Image (cartoon, grey):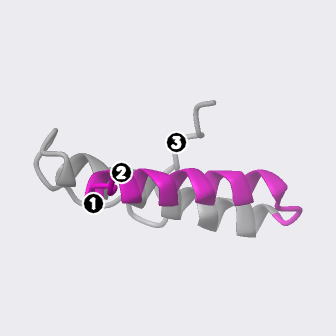
Amino acid sequence: MSTTEAEDYVKRAEECLRLAGACIAESNRQILIYAAVHWRMLAEEAAGRRAPSRPPKPDEEIPSPSA
């Protein structure tokens, strides 16, 4: 069974969150969470669940990851 594009994006988002949890430096953690948010957006778009949207601006609050 091959993974779909959306599933690949979800896996990448999960990996970013896993790495973020292991970060000591807050700046690195925030970068990885930011990347995870974008991978999730791409996954949702690829799955056709929502229309493409703009990514959050760098000064916007980044949502905390859900477990």
The label shown at residue 7 is 2
* View extreme (right): residue: 24
Residue 29 located left or right of residue 42: right
Q: Residue 25 lies in what quarter of the image? A: bottom right
Which residue has dot 3 on it? 63
The secondary element bearing badge 3 is classed as loop
The secondary element bearing badge 1 is classed as helix
Instruction: Give, as a single range, the part of the protein colored magenta.
Output: 1-25
The secondary element bearing badge 2 is classed as helix
Q: Is residue 41 magenta?
A: no
Q: Is residue 23 magenta?
A: yes
- Identified by mark 3, the residue type is Pro
Instruction: Give the residue displayed 59% in from the left and 39% down from the top.
Output: 65
Instruction: Give the residue displayed 19% in from the left and 46% down from the top.
Output: 47
Of badges 3 and 1, nearer the viewer stands 1
- For the residues labelled 3 and 2, the Cα–Cα distance comes to 21 Å
The label shown at residue 49 is none
- For the residues labelled 3 and 1, the Cα–Cα distance comes to 23 Å
Viewer-side residue, 5 vs 57: 5
- For the residues labelled 1 and 2, the Cα–Cα distance comes to 5 Å
Q: Residue 38 lies in what quarter of the image? A: bottom left
Counting residues from the N terminus, which is met first, the one under dot 3 or under dot 1?
A: 1
- Identified by mark 2, the residue type is Glu
| Contact? badges 3 and 2 (CB < 8 Å) | no
| Contact? badges 1 and 2 (CB < 8 Å) | yes
* Mark 1 Cα-neighbour bin, 10 Å: few <14, some 14–19, many ≥20: few
Counting from the top left corner in percent of width and height, residue 53 is at 19, 55
* Mark 2 Cα-neighbour bin, 10 Å: few <14, some 14–19, many ≥20: some
- Identified by mark 1, the residue type is Glu
Which residue has dot 1 on it? 5
Counting from the top left corner in percent of width and height, residue 49 is at 16, 38
